[in-house]
Image (cartoon, grey):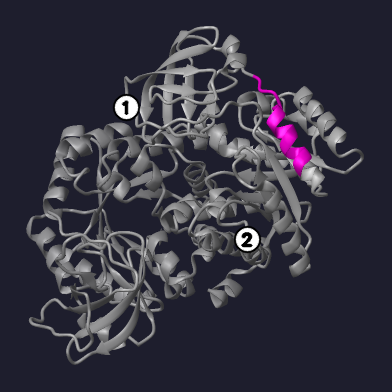
Amino acid sequence: MRTKVLATTGPRLCEVEHFIDCAADGIYDFRIHLGKNRDNLQFIKNIIEAQKISGKKLNVYVDIPSNRPRIGKIEKTLLQSGSYICFYDSKEKNVKSNIEVSRYIPVDMLDGFIGKLKNNTNLLIKDGNIVLDIIYLNKKGKYFVGKCVKAVTPFESGASCHVRGMNYELLTDETINFIKLLKEHDIEIYGIIFSFSSSSSQILNAKKIISDILNSDSIKYIAKIESREGIKNFESICNVSDAIMIGRGDLAQDIQPYYLPIIQQELIVKAAKMKTKVIVATHFLEKYAHNGYLSAAELNDIWCAIQQGANMIMLSGESGGSPLSKQCMKLLVYLIKEFEKQ
Amino acid sequence: MDNKRTGILASMGPTLEEIDDICFALNNGVSNFRIHLGLKTRDYCKYFRNAVKSAEITKKDIEVLLDLPSSRPRIGKFPGCELKKGDIIKVVNERESNDKSTIPLFGIDKIIPFLHINDYVTFRDGRIKFRIIEIEPTSIKMECVSAILPLVQMCSCLFMSESVVFEPYIQEDVEALYKIKNEGLVPNWIALSFASEVEQINKLKCMINQIWPNKPIKTMAKIENRKGIKNLDKLLEVCEGVMVARGDLLLNINPITLPMCQKQIIDMCKNRGKVSVVATEVLDSLADKGIINRAELSDIALAVRQGASAIMLARESGNSQHAKECIQLLNKIIEIESKNITFSQLVELI
């Protein structure tokens, strides 16, 4: 198998047995998504345990989420189109909006973000499935009000917020603490994925901080390209990264979705020329994970990525959260093997 | 559908029947319209008239494709039912049934001679699957194997048996075509579902020639089973176009061969100067849920790069509250994929 599978961990892919099964099926690479509030340290320990038992080398990729704001603790709900929502800094108490709103939603890491917001821009959540028009900003009061213009998926804790064109810091205190924790537990990981990589200098800085903490220079650094800025600086980013990841979910909300296929094609070709490996992520078996039926679109998408020369295909919720997690992983391995034969 | 650029074939329906909506489609890259004659309750003559009027208003050339569903039986009038694994139902050769466990499937009597015990029968693109457990001269009994959607009237069924060959049309289709002719309308294309034998196309051509003598009406073979793929070479000698009807095709072939099949069918059409259409599940997620699925974007781009003459929208254009978004998004992808853009130009564009 020339094209590998990177499987995201989650409630359906976290136990030692799960990882042992994966190793038997030909999946050796696992992604830990630090943006999600999970027992990530235990997940990594379980992968290491599975490695000992299976005798196969298993690789841990830690995906660090940037300082992009995330929705704080709320109950999962579907927003109503046309409703007014107040987003406030989750560190603040008793926020009272000057404009009448139907809901208050706490947001983590709002500090840096709110300063750069402008009225009449779109706040994008969950890969563009939820869109709000920002109609009122109160930077002093640390909140803003958005009018919901589209909401086709439910709103939930941990969902990240984005405004087109906005760039973020790669590292946060939380991330650094987690890396320190890895060091304390003497845990070795294979790679670090930098979400929202937008420039080479940013990556160089972050690499230096992380390698200093871990005192290691064998870690692979993967730049996740999910913004226009990342595409613009693609060559210089490739020069300082061991691999790049095309994060199709966020990318197709920062740029118009109809540019995604040609961008994927161009980036894979460009990376190959620069001898940089490519991981392609998002929606490979999303529909299958929901209904258990193979679709022409998903078959062609996987086939196309392999033809283009992607080195790795990533599963997100398909492996981490879907009740069909195991089937999705087995299916992808099977499809890759068959497609590579053709 | 003979242009160099991949076109859009948009199915008409409740969300694409009024002149305003059709004009919107015409202004957003749609130049071919499909009218599905399987749903006789729809006013297909009105669809056709409005398409012609809209073309006059926008001063654009259009092609209209009439899609014949073949003699494949459809469920008649029936209360509908939710099924689960193990449920047993009876299929009868009737047009109507009031009983939830008796499915009216008029025309089944002609198919019964080809069926065997343990053959699979599916409905709704495979979302409901049965196994035949008993065969009588005019009825069959089936056991439900899986069902994630309810069984409702008008669903067409698929017999996973290689030996079943459908008639290219039924009497109702001929009546429908005469009705269209009597309004003075002439289609550019007539498509035949489950095309697998040259004789089917010849028979269809004869019928078309009787209704519209000496009109240049083209025929399109919808490839949706293995026999159709096997006989593609011969089919291409008698028809002007081919549709890769991926919904049923996916159920009839080994799914891993679908990408290769699609590519080869398009290649064969290109080499022989024939029209190729890629159909089914093009923007389902956007049509049904308003979600832009990244795999669907890749899939569309791939069909454009492969050189398909047109990409078809089914309910995405004809029966979706996101119909306009579907048309615009498809048009944009085709536009971008058809241009020769360098990376540096692309960076400026995005």
Q: Chief secondary structure of the magenta span?
A: helix
Q: Is residue A116 left or right of residue B319?
A: left
Q: Is residue B168 magenta?
A: yes
Image coordinates of residue B327 in percent, x first then y, are: 58, 60
The residue drawn where x is 47% and y is 41% is A295
Q: Secondary structure at mark 2?
A: loop
Residue with the mark numbered 1: B84
Please, which residue is most extreme toward the right here?
B214
- Residue position marked by numbered label 2 in the rendering: B18
**Quadrant in the picture for residue A84:** bottom left
Tag 2: amino acid: Glu
Image quadrant in which you'd find residue A186:
bottom left
Task: Check if mark 1's residue and mark 2's residue have beta carbons within 8 Å.
Answer: no
Chain at tag 2: B
Residue nearer the viewer, A126 or A276 = A126
Label 1 resides on the chain identified as B
Residue, x 28% and y 44% (percent of image)? A322
Q: In the rendered image, which quarter is residue A139 located in?
A: bottom left
Helix, strand or loop for disc 1: loop
> Which residue appears at 26% of the width and 63% of the height?
A155
Task: Confirm whether the magenta stretch covers residue B251.
Answer: no
Disc 1/disc 2 C-alpha distance (Å): 39 Å
Q: From the viewer's perspective, is the residue at label 1 or at label 2 nearer?
A: 2
Q: Looking at the picture, how far across and down is residue B209, in whole percent?
A: 87, 34
Q: Earlier in the sequence, mark 1 or mark 2?
A: 2
Q: Which residues are magenta?
A: B165-179
Q: Can the viewer see residue B241?
A: no
Can residue B74 be seen here? The reply is yes
Looking at the image, which is closer to me, B208 or A109?
A: B208
Q: Position of residue B221 (x, y in %)?
A: 72, 35
How many neighbours does mark 1 have within 10 angstroms: few (below 14), some (14-19), or many (20 or more)? some
Q: What amino acid is labelled 1 in the image?
A: Lys
